[in-house]
Image: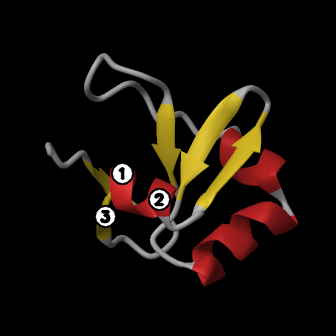
Amino acid sequence: MGESMELDFICGQEIDAQKATEQGLTSMYDGCTYVFCSRECKQEFDRNPSAYANLDMGDSDGGEDLYTY
């Protein structure tokens, strides 16, 4: 099982995106999936997703659009 490490841009922690997804630490917004390290970071995003979704995250691995905040 390969780990997909991503950066949580709210707290700066490096996280395993697959584990975060399995734990329900994701949100959908404007057709994209956003991944978080904790419920607190997810809740921060969910309060105002447009403020975070407008940040230019780029596509670091050329794969699926999976964002972390």
- Marks 2/3: CA distance? 12 Å
**At 57% from the left edge and 64% from the top edge, which residue is drawn?**
25
Three-letter code for the amino acid on which mark 3 is drawn: Ile
- Judging by the rendered image, the residue that carries numbered circle 3 is 15
Mark number, residue 22? 2
Q: Is residue 23 above or below residue 34?
A: below
43 left or right of 55 in image: right
Q: Position of residue 16 (x, y in %)?
A: 29, 59
Q: Secondary structure at mark 2?
A: helix
49 left or right of 57 in image: right
Q: Is residue 63 above or below residue 35?
A: above
Q: Quick one: label 2, few (<14), some, or many (20+) residues within 10 Å?
A: few
Q: Position of residue 6 (x, y in %)?
A: 31, 51
- Judging by the rendered image, the residue that carries numbered circle 1 is 18
Three-letter code for the amino acid on which mark 1 is drawn: Gln
Q: Answer yes or no: do the residues labelled 1 and 2 have beta carbons within 8 Å?
A: yes
**At 60% from the left edge and 74% from the top edge, which residue is drawn?**
41
- Marks 1/2: CA distance? 6 Å
